[in-house]
Image: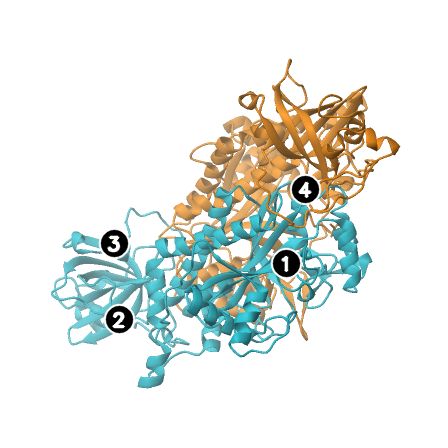
Chain colours: A orange, B cyan
Amino acid sequence: MPSAAGRGQGQDRRPESEDSSAADDYAKERYGVSSMIQSQEKPDRVLIRIKDLTVEKADEVVWVRGRIHTSRAKGKQCFLVLRQQQFNIQALVAVGQHASKQMVKFAANINKESIVDVEGVVRKAHQKIGGCTQQDVELHVQRIYVISLAEPRLPLQLDDAVRPEVEGEEDGRATVNQDTRLDNRVIDLRTSTSQAIFCLQSGICQLFRETLTRKGFVEIQTPKIISAASEGGANVFTVSYFKSSAYLAQSPQLYKQMCICADFEKVFCVGPVFRAEDSNTHRHLTEFVGLDIEMAFNYHYHEVVDEIADTLVQIFKGLQERFQTEIQTVNKQFPCEPFKFLEPTLRLEYREAVAMLREAGVEMGDEEDLSTPNEKLLGRLVKEKYDTDFYILDKYPLAVRPFYTMPDPVNPKNSNSYDMFMRGEEILSGAQRIHDPQLLTERAKHHGIDLEKIKAYIDSFRFGAPPHAGGGIGLERVTMLYLGLHNVRQTSMFPRDPKRLTP
Amino acid sequence: MPSAAGRGQGQDRRPESEDSSAADDYAKERYGVSSMIQSQEKPDRVLIRIKDLTVEKADEVVWVRGRIHTSRAKGKQCFLVLRQQQFNIQALVAVGQHASKQMVKFAANINKESIVDVEGVVRKAHQKIGGCTQQDVELHVQRIYVISLAEPRLPLQLDDAVRPEVEGEEDGRATVNQDTRLDNRVIDLRTSTSQAIFCLQSGICQLFRETLTRKGFVEIQTPKIISAASEGGANVFTVSYFKSSAYLAQSPQLYKQMCICADFEKVFCVGPVFRAEDSNTHRHLTEFVGLDIEMAFNYHYHEVVDEIADTLVQIFKGLQERFQTEIQTVNKQFPCEPFKFLEPTLRLEYREAVAMLREAGVEMGDEEDLSTPNEKLLGRLVKEKYDTDFYILDKYPLAVRPFYTMPDPVNPKNSNSYDMFMRGEEILSGAQRIHDPQLLTERAKHHGIDLEKIKAYIDSFRFGAPPHAGGGIGLERVTMLYLGLHNVRQTSMFPRDPKRLTP
């Protein structure tokens, strides 16, 4: 903590006297702890972005706001690294015309992660500055004021938090475990890796909507508080609703389908979905973000499958084009092969997948669902054979799909349903839905579902319903698998699981 | 209901015999009820959009899928109006080479709102066809198959549902009340007015994100299930969370602020917010969509106010440019003055508003909040004086704002906070937030808030926090007020209020 911690008035940044030698301090106006910014004034001062500090700016005097990333005092000098998001620059405070020894001491004592305003001259560096993004320049500090002071003991060190696990294991250097990260998410999210992950995730949402808007889809908003658990009642959170109770929607599916019945034709939505599953795995969350699509088609549900697959391909391409820096940043900490995909997307039938698995020694029935290990094995087999990390599995056995799934017209044991996979893990589940109220009633009865509870659902199809299909994508899974990460908690800013509700 | 309701096989559309005269029916292959589309095949047939049926297509044979909007038999002819979203065309089935009298009868008996595939020749109309969007052409039907049959009794008539209230009142013609609409939302959403409202709403979201992305904002996803009611605990829904309980977020504010403390600098999110308020007014919902913004600033919170106001202005402009058709469609049923706004946006201080109200005869104290009637009156006064439907009210009394609001640096009774208004109703509330943990603690104590419950919130600011401000916009209110509608339930697809949880 800086010893000159006195607060000035307004934005007249006057450090108070540090000790009896203050009177001798010729630089005492040039440093200090600024008073809290309370919008006292609108100064003309322009703050330059650290990423814009390059040799073109050499010898210019600039103002910069950044965090103290590291600081190292060395005799009459203090080297700071100032950080701003993913960018950082070395700043030098050295005793001389502008800085007194008191000022150097003050700078050296500012707690890490504090936010400072610095005035300095941009100087070309004599040699590349390793460890900084701005390698060719450094900042010679003339003034430095603390804008927001961090407490001295950080719950985790940012350098530890970006260290590849293998370095931690082999060299015995500190890494940060997941719970510490998540408990202190505000600091963990400051790392270059986290910044890159969530900028890329923002890009996925943007590309998803951009692509669908171009394809003529309309964005809809569906309610999350619902009166009945439409998919049966298991795994659903209950909400107190005034004097009654309600549920949290496990998916927007009913509402997407109602929009199709209401002639919106092609709809999408992005929003939270809630699953009260007590699953403590690397890929389950109790609340995640669903990227949902529903679309009326003319004659065949593959019209919809093709649109969804193309949407994902446009996302993959867009990420490659626009987020190369972020991908490389994440790769530094979590090395991984680039994500591969084909155009058009590979589509296999379920029976083909079963045959591939059997050939690899797996024993399974024709109508058995894929276990998680078999999903992953299949992913490896498909990658070997077709060289793609993304594919569609079509024509699932009817028995393993929900009651509203349209049966296959030829083989009644199959269905017009599909999953999509990235690096051997499911990221989307979808199907042609039954749009005929009579068949829907039959299928619900067959599944032993209480017809009274799904009456509103079935009634939606009584006044003319176009054939339609759709699917729901898990945003956190797409982010995780595209980047080759191993836990969905890395790609949820504030993850929720059966054991975690904070922060 | 069509009497020839037999089902063909696959997509070989063979109507079964209607009566003993079937043998004489030379057109019997040309009409009928198609079997359910189960993705049996992928025919080459191209379906033309109704909006694309213009005189340029005259004399072409086309296939169209649409709903039977109306039907009227007249001797040997039957006039149908086929509807597709907001577009419709007249179709004529007449006894002749392609259609038998049985076929005309079949067509005339198809229930309204059923979906049909029609093959026909596009013919130039002899005179403008009133009541149809495609006024210059009609379709001479050669084949007609029912794709999805509607039940005969519709719970509401679409024509009634788009009738202006004044016509209903003056001419005694039927209109549809709000509960009937909402109870049968799938049909109500098919009207041209509903289609237009929700296309425009989709546009608001798109313009909001487009503008902010261009300004360098990052989209974030914040959790809706939270462990503690951060804003005190009133008006919050409780959720059963495994063996414990949790709450539904009343706003993403804490999480937006944490992202600012985590250096994302400028963030936005679009998502549901939940308010357990037992308010049964025209503008309150228990679940609505929040368009939220949070932004670090350099020296003055007006930097943020300007960005938010400009974002709204970009939305207003974008709507004018891209959604003129939708605005006009809604205006037909709900006439209203075009929405007016200034550039830059008018910003008044709270004390100026109080002075205007007092001059108009209102008695109110300096630190009193605006009542709803006073808000509306102020809107009218501002419109008269400045000719704008959109303005900012800045510098609210500190006493009427939440504890985390930054006090004004000059007058401690005021605060760095603001609301924004459209047509005299609040659509955004925002403020500079206190980023100093010590002042935040003091203010929370002053408000009598249990410090233990907001510990995580306060701790977020302990490791360096930039000054920041933000605000939350209600999507349904913006849609309602932009279009000059009078109930927020008209602009929520599936509204939730204390008395409505369905559909």
Query: Which of marks 4 and 3 precedes in the sequence?
Result: 3
Position in image of residue A345 (x %, y %)? 45, 36
- The three-letter amino acid code for the residue at tag 3 is Asp
Residues marked 3 and 4 touching at CB (< 8 Å): no
SS state under label 4: loop
Specify whether disc 3 shares its chain with disc 2. Answer: yes
Q: Residues within 10 Å of mark 4 (few under 14, many from 20)?
A: many
Mark toward the viewer: 3 or 4: 4
Going by the image, does A210 lie left or right of A68?
left
Asked if labels 1 and 2 touch by Cβ distance under 8 angstroms, the answer is no
For marks 2 and 1, give the one nearer the viewer: 1
Q: Which residue occupies 63% across, 33% down?
A: A64
> Pointer 1: what residue?
B251
Q: Amino acid at mark 4?
A: Ala
Q: Residue furthest right?
A: A20
Q: Name the chain letter of the residue that bears numbered label 1.
A: B
Residue annotated with mark 4: B262
Compute the Cα span from label 3 to label 4. 51 Å
Q: Nearer the viewer, residue A238 or B462?
A: B462
x and y percent of residue A227 in the render? 60, 68
**Residue at mark 4 to residue at mark 1: CA–CA distance:** 19 Å
Kind of residue at disc 2? Glu
Q: Earlier in the sequence, mark 1 or mark 3?
A: 3
Q: Residues within 10 Å of mark 2 (few under 14, many from 20)?
A: some
Residue type, numbered disc 1: Ser
Report the chain holding disc 4. B
Among the two numbered marks 3 and 2 on one chain, the one whose residue lies closer to the N terminus: 2
Task: Work out how far the residue at label 4 is from the one at label 2, CA to CA, in angstroms.
Answer: 72 Å
Q: Which residue is mark 3?
A: B52
Counting other residues with Cα less than 10 Å from the Cα at mark 3, is it few (<14), some (14-19), or many (20 or more)? few
